[in-house]
Image: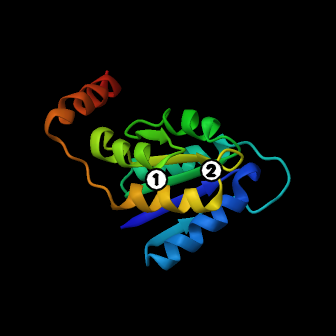
Amino acid sequence: MRVIIASDHGGINLRNEITSLLEEMNINYEDIGCSCEGSVDYPDYGIPAAERVADGEFDYGILVCGTGIGMTISANKVKGVRCALVHDVFSAKATRQHNDANVIALGERVIGPGLAREIISTFLNEEYEGGRHANRVAKIKAYEEQ
């Protein structure tokens, strides 16, 4: 499993917590920043990370900003990305099982490090169920192809 992780200035602390978790889980990851505390624009980090997931270089992407909203919107502009904004464990599980999400976004100002660890662990360990959900995901993919 290969994971790419990125944040803007509002998500640095939570991103650092998540990279520690990825190391503990022995997951191969690349952290593409940001590495500053000054204000930066979340699309400058979220879009390149999402593109690399869509291109197949990474299996999953993890994006963090203040709320997770900006990163989610940015990532979902990339064809082939299904990014879910997640702030609870149930949603992390459901978005993998039902939506085949390949990118997850979290908000540092919304959740704490302990919950973030649970969310990421759940997201990375769940499998897409397919079945009754496959038709729905296929409709999204078909729309992207128009």
Q: Is residue 19 visible?
A: yes
| Kind of residue at disc 1 | Arg
Q: Is residue 58 visible?
A: no
Q: Which label's residue is closer to the chain start, 2 or 1?
A: 1
Q: What residue is disc 2 on?
A: 64
| Crowdedness near tag 1: few (<14), some (14–19) or many (≥20) residues, C-alpha within 10 Å | some
Helix, strand or loop for disc 1: helix
Residue 112 image-quadrant placement:
bottom right
Percent position of residue 140, x then y:
31, 28
Residue extending farthest to the right is 38
Give me the disc on residue 52: 1
Left or right: 116 in relation to 25: right
Residue at 24% x, 28% y: name it: 136
Helix, strand or loop for disc 2: strand
Eyeballing the image, is 83 above or below 125? Answer: above
Eyeballing the image, is 144 above or below 67? Answer: above
| Kind of residue at disc 2 | Val
